[in-house]
Amino acid sequence: MSYRIVIEPGAKSKNYWKDLWAYRGLFYFLAWRDVLVRYKQAAIGIGWSVIRPLLTIAAMWFIGALFNSKVPDGVPRVLLVSAATLPWTFFSTAFSEASNSLIANSNLLSKVYFPRLIVPVSTIMVCLIDFFISFILLALLMVVYRYVPDWRILLMPLFLLLAVVTALGTGLLIAALNVKYRDFRYIVSFIVQFGLYASPVAFSSEDVYHKLAQLGQAGMVLKVIYSLNPVVGVIDGFRWSILGSNVSIYMPGFLCSIAISFFFLFLGVWYFRRTERAFADVI
């Protein structure tokens, strides 16, 4: 009598989610491997976690000053830009890494079974490490400008969680699409480049809403379109928690951004799980 063992990835949803915990060792390995590989042959090493946001801060500060965007009273422009650059840098890096994670680990996917969800999630954890390192830069700037945050700073982890949700949802969706349609790797670059200028990094959402309000009915439509960008809610939340009462949040737009973020999370997980079985065959 002979026996045959058939391995079916994700045969049952309940088993799949249990497998995520069972394969946590692989999750830690992939995350640590990505940390080592990212800075292994870099002369500056982990210093890039500070240099990249620093260069972005300088560029966005210059653009904001050039176009004379409005700055809330009592808030230095560099702090306004810095409080937005950190979550944007995290999102753009996490989104890009997660979107290309399956292609980058194609050899692993085609050889052994494990919950494929581990791959993009592990890349986001690496980006979180970069975020905490670069946060030191913002802390130093606040010391230089003698800007002391109030109790709202305690809520910053909630907005960081929102940034993770936004990056994970969009990253999972594009990662699954990228396996079958390799053209999406070019779309990722476009989204990141366009999103930097479409998101309130060099300027404040308060300034945007104020100018759109002067356009009447057309401005109301543009407000809705602007709020559909999920990163808007992330950046506004960070600024509110870090800069305190000097920065206000337009609540309808903020809630719209949150809803879009969780919609993409649901859509990303659903589509990823729906197409996961075919990854090894297609890749």
Image: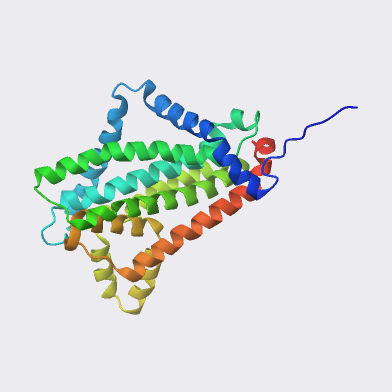
Which residue corresponds to the image point at 28% horizontal and 74% vertical from the top-left?
213
Residue at far bottom of view: 217
Which residue corresponds to the image point at 12% horizontal and 62% vertical from the top-left?
73
Q: Give residue 151's quadrant in the image.
A: bottom left
Which residue corresponds to the image point at 56% horizontal and 35% vertical from the top-left?
23
Visible residue check, residue 116: no
Visible residue check, residue 49: yes
Q: Residue 246 at what x, y percent from top left?
A: 16, 62
Judge by depth and name the residue closer to the eye, 19 or 162.
19
Q: Is residue 248 above or below residue 50?
A: below
Q: Residue 42 at what x, y percent from top left?
A: 34, 23
Residue at far right of view: 1
Q: Is residue 172 above or below residue 26?
A: below
Which residue corresponds to the image point at 57% horizontal and 37% vertical from the top-left?
22
Q: Residue 6 at what x, y percent from top left?
A: 77, 35
Q: Is residue 46 left or right of residue 186?
A: left
Q: Pick the quarter of the image with the C terminus.
A: top right
Judge by depth and name the residue closer to the eye, 8 or 266.
8
Q: Residue 192 at what x, y percent from top left?
A: 40, 47
Q: Is residue 248 left or right of residue 253?
A: left
Judge by depth and name the residue closer to the eye, 34 or 56.
34
Q: Is residue 34 above or below residue 21?
A: above
- How many numbered discs sit on the rendered protein? 0
> How is the model colour-coded?
rainbow
Q: Pick the quarter of the image with the N terminus.
A: top right
